[in-house]
């Protein structure tokens, strides 16, 4: 069971608001998801279904220099796979991911929703064949802003707020 | 330049996959195939996998194959197929494709034709996948319009009835965006064309009008496409009856129409066209059903690479 330690703050003066660089540096090993759209941090964690017992720190509505409010998630001793990062990108398309090993950032880049992908999401159309055949959904990104994908089978368009993750 | 080769081995899953020049090539081919019978498809086997009954579509295809000397195997409903035993569509397709050269598939679930095409090495023709697509119906509608009016570009085409759930209307309206047709949509508010479709028309810069009064729309029409209000869409029988009888085309309304107006209907009809209209010289809905055989003959011959002798 994940036990997110929530860290909520509304201004930069707050003692609960460490500098983002410090947060990254403090993690010995794991993944930092930064610049998540405000309010999406917990949703990302729900979707990721991390191994039981994973230590996670969640910051909600932190003040970001460039984006106004943002969420931040630090996952200890766990490196997200590409598929997991893609799920995060579908929730928060302009987030960044940093992989930390031995206190060092070994990889940091912006997340981009895939152009076309299989799995990750479930088609929301109950009449779609994927449900009866029990196969993974297959989608193409139809629009990036607002993020909308289209099921390859039934061609139903699904907007980000309707996403159901597989 | 489109040639017969562009159709060889191709899947026919949605109308959106066909460009204007390809559609016109198919219509030209259907013109030539209208009177063709013989042994063009001798030795070829076409499978009709109909997981839900659609007698009309199946007979039309079987007639097309039969007239060209091919043969059909298959089933006409899910109850007698292996689906009743829990087999997936994917497995059915993998087995049956070893018995035939072409798969004609109908299924109540949306996207089934695409799924079948992923598992089949032979062409798949979507003969209706739920509310999603039935591309050969649209080809037949286009063929009928051109056959009866001599052209498609520039025509004033009025759609009336259930534009909300009518799959045939959605597909045809979509395809008409590739022809400079003027579209008028006549429906009660509840049965209007879905917002998503209207938005797509706006995005493509297509001009259309929406009206509720059939009588007011008729005088301008070159083509009047009537549709049935589908009873299965309503839970309240009174609601259904109210909408079913919203529009009934009769000779009185047709008195206001152009003399050469062409009346279409994907059939079956219920009350939306009075039987007195059937003898109108431009009541084309039964011919529309018959043209289906010509279009399907041409399409199957093209997909299997046997059309060149006729074209
Ligand atoms: Zn779907």
Image (cartoon, coloured by chain):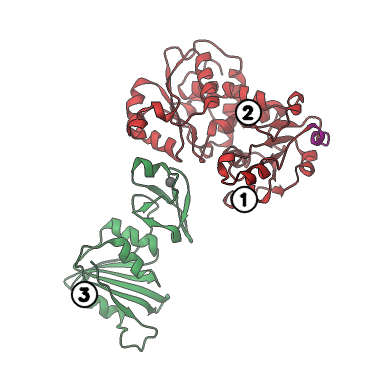
Chain colours: A green, B red
Is the residue marked 3 within 8 Å of ligand 1, measured from its CB?
no
Q: Tags 1 and 3 in contact by the CB under 8 Å rule?
A: no
Q: Mark 1 points at which residue?
A: B198
Taking A4 as reference, is B115 left or right?
A: right
Residue B249 appears in which quarter of the rendering? top right
Asked if one can make out residue A80 in the rendered structure from this viewpoint, the answer is yes
Residue B270 to residue A106: above or below = above
Question: Quick one: B66 or B228, which is closer to the camera?
Answer: B228
Give SS at disc 1. Answer: helix
Residue B77 to residue A131: above or below = above
Dot 1 falls on which chain? Answer: B
- Residue at 34% x, 34% y is B90
Taking A52 as reference, is B65 left or right?
A: right
On the image, the x and y values in percent for residue A50 come to 24, 63
Dot 3 falls on which chain? Answer: A
Magenta part of the chain:
B251-256
Q: Give the Cα distance between marks 1 and 3.
A: 52 Å
Label ID, residue B143: 2
Q: Mark 3 points at which residue?
A: A27
Q: Give the Cα distance between marks 2 and 1.
A: 24 Å
Residue B299 to residue A19: above or below = above
């Amino acid at each position: 069971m994940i036990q997110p330690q929530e860290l909520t703050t509304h201004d930069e003066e707050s003692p609960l608001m460490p500098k983002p660089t410090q947060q990254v540096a403090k993690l010995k090993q794991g993944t930092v998801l930064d610049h998540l759209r405000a309010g999406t941090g917990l949703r990302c964690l729900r979707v990721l279904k991390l191994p039981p017992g994973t230590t996670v720190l969640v910051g909600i509505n932190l003040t970001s220099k460039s984006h106004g409010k943002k969420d931040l998630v630090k996952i200890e001793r766990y490196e997200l796979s590409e598929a997991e990062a893609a799920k995060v990108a579908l929730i928060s398309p302009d987030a960044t991911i940093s992989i930390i090993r031995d206190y060092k950032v070994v990889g940091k880049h912006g997340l981009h929703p895939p152009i076309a992908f299989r799995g990750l999401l479930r088609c929301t159309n109950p009449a779609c064949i994927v449900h009866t055949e029990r196969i993974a959904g297959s989608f193409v990104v139809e629009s990036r802003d607002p993020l909308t994908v289209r099921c390859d089978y039934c061609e139903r368009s699904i907007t980000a707020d309707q996403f159901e993750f597989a | 330049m489109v040639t017969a080769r562009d159709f060889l081995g191709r899947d026919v899953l949605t109308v959106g996959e066909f460009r204007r020049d390809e559609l016109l090539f198919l219509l030209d081919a259907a013109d030539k195939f209208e009177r063709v019978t013989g042994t063009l498809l001798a030795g070829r086997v076409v499978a009709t996998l109909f997981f839900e009954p659609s007698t009309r579509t199946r007979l039309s295809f079987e007639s097309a194959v039969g007239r060209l000397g091919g043969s059909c195997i298959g089933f006409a409903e899910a109850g007698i197929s292996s689906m009743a035993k829990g087999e997936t569509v994917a497995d059915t397709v993998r087995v049956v494709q070893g018995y035939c050269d072409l798969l004609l598939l109908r299924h109540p679930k949306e996207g089934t034709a695409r799924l079948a095409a992923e598992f089949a090495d032979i062409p798949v023709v979507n003969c209706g996948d739920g509310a999603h697509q039935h591309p050969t119906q649209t080809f037949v509608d286009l063929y009928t319009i051109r056959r009866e009016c001599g052209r498609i570009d520039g025509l004033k085409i009025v759609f009336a009835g259930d534009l909300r759930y009518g799959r045939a209307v959605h597909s045809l309206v979509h395809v008409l965006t590739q022809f400079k047709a003027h579209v008028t949509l006549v429906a009660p508010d509840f049965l209007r064309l879905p917002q998503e479709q209207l938005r797509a028309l706006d995005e493509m810069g297509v001009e259309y009008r929406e009206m509720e009064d059939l009588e007011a729309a008729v005088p301008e029409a070159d083509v009047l496409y009537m549709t049935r209000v589908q009873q299965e869409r309503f839970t309240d029988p009174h609601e259904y009856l109210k909408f079913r009888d919203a529009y009934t085309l009769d000779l009185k309304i047709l008195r206001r129409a152009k003399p050469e107006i062409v009346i279409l209907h994907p059939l079956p009809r219920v009350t939306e066209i009075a039987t007195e209209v059937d003898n109108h010289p431009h009541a084309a809905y039964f011919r529309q059903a018959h043209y289906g055989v010509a279009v399907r003959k041409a399409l199957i011959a093209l997909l299997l690479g046997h059309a060149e002798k006729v074209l």
